[in-house]
Amino acid sequence: MTENTNEALKAAGGETAAESRNFIEQAIDKDLAEGVYTTVHTRFPPEPNGYLHIGHAKSILLNYGLAQEYGGKFNLRFDDTNPTKEKSEFVESIKADVAWLGADWEDRLFFASDYFEEMYEVAVKLIRKGKAYVSDLTAEQMREYRGTLTEPGKEDPNRNRSIEENLDLFTRMKNGEFADGEKTLRAKIDMASSNINMRDPILYRVAHMAHQNTGDKWCIYPMYDFAHPIEDAIEGITHSICTLEFEDHRPLYDWVVREAEYPHPPRQIEFAKLFLTNVVTGKRYIKKLVEEKIVDGWDDPRLVSIAALRRRGYTPESIRRFVELCGISKSQSSVDDAMLEYCIREDLKPGCKRMMAVLHPVKLVIDNYPEGQTEELTAENNLENPELGTRPLTFGRELWVEQDDFMEEPPKKYYRLFPGNEVRLMHAYFVKCTGCEKDENGNVTVIHATYDPETKCGSGFAGRKVKGTIHWVYAGNAVPCTARLYENIIDEEKGVYNEDGSLNLNPNSLTVCEAYVEPALAQAEVYDRFQFVRNGYFCVDSKDSEPGRPVFNRIVGLKSSFVLPK
Ligand code: ATP
Ligand code: MG
């Protein structure tokens, strides 16, 4: 765009090229223009202590997207510096999720633990420069000495140990001569700093624990704030993008890369985490739901882990679209969870076949349809997309219809089946309800009707109108299957937490239906997606389906009052 069009657009109230770039792009543009960096290299650095969730998807797509946009590189790096919680199950799930989202790390897959040796050497270098010392303070003393937001900290009694003594003690820490918690290595920065992170933070701790990658090689482990900038610097990361809670850690990040004397120090830029209304996103909370077996594993379709969204039927495109719509910001806010549903609905609308499935079945008998006779009807697969073709449907005397499509005593404006009323059976005939049968508890077991052979769909008949159209499946060849309907796992009305701090669970978050579907759906394969008319979009479950007996997860309903924000 030229200067002039920019001006013209501005005058017309439109966006200019510069204004439409988010603040991270603007910072990168500036760095490149000023020659601070000549290329862009980003990374996604998950800690393998759980499955990734929708918030991580934002970070992945942001980092990968920037590398793509600037023709740079993108690394996937496991931040596995903490030997207690990390598991290889999580490493595998994270790789699968990042790949599924389309963020291609090519051959740049790294583990922070591969850099333990170099981190150790940086620590030695800092000691030699008089910038780090070994402390004897216990964790509790450390807290006391740290001070508060309003009071400065107190100097560690070991702060002025000689370089020789520090080198000796640090070597002995490494050699396993001290117990957990007995010694730490601290940076020597400023106990009076207004930023508590700069008050001689711990760089290394003693922990006699095996690490999943390095085994028993180490009994000292680097702290996150020391390790992370070094990992970035080693990999040649230019822009280390992280979330806002690290803003106050940035001076320490800069201190580490400066004192370690890396020739091209990376730069940290923070953005606001993605939160959704009514949805539990934090790894910690999801873990709690999994461990307490409130959900069926990390990929339970009610969760917003990436694995759960995939299993529920979300597409990578819909998640990319969602993240795009959310934008990048510096201020914390929550996005309406209906926007995520909007994105998948928009993605599925044009390409899905619209089939009939009866989720809460009751028998409809058409008494004037000859017993033993059937006929074949033709149904369009998607009226708005003729390319999806047509399919045959069997019609006969006994059908399954939805229980709530019949009422013996209907309220006003109820246009479906009730005695004396006529409705259209989708793709088939008009039928007039004549009554019902009930069991001893008063539950309707069979609905009776008569059909009008003149009203066959596609026959051009237009003699009279009916107000209701209902869906159905022919009982003679319907396929029984399970359909699962979901609601938010948290009861939205009452908030995320109860007074005692426990999660406020919605008892109706899962409804399991023994449904009937069209015979063609028996052959549906795992991850196939359909619209079930009037019931929503469904996806074949990847865990619980069996050949010929699919389990369908409802991805999302058909309608919403959600309006796309301008
Ligand atoms: P959680 O907050 O869910 O426990 P985490 O931040 O501990 O997640 P990490 O594995 O440390 O998880 O995160 C990897 C990257 O993903 C980090 O750069 C982190 O800032 C980013 N990230 C985590 N949660 C979100 C979120 N909700 N929105 C955007 N980015 C996020
Ligand atoms: Mg974390």
Image (cartoon, grey):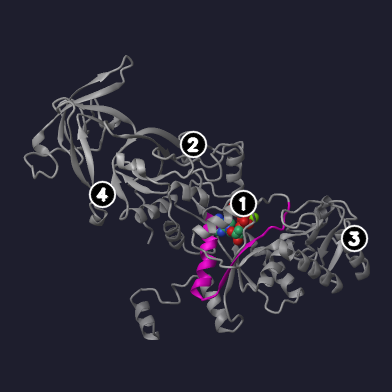
Name the residue tied to disc 3. Answer: 172
Q: Is residue 225 left or right of residue 557?
A: right
Q: CB of residue at label 2: within 8 Å of ligand 1? A: no
Mark 1–mark 2 CB contact (< 8 Å): no
Alpha-carbon span between mark 4 and mark 3: 73 Å
Q: CB of residue at label 1: within 8 Å of ligand 1? A: no
Name the residue tied to disc 1. Answer: 90
Identify which amino acid the numbered label 1 is placed on.
Phe
N-term-proximal mark, 4 vs 3: 3
Q: CB of residue at label 4: within 8 Å of ligand 1? A: no
Query: Dot 2, crowdedness within 10 Å: few (<14), some or many (≥20)?
Result: some
Q: Is residue 190 left or right of residue 73?
A: right
Point 56% across, 45% down: residue: 298
Q: Is residue 395 left or right of residue 323?
A: left
On the rendered image, what quadrant is the C terminus found in?
A: bottom left
Point 35% across, 53% down: residue: 348
Q: Position of residue 380 (x, y in %)?
A: 22, 48
Mark 1–mark 3 CB contact (< 8 Å): no
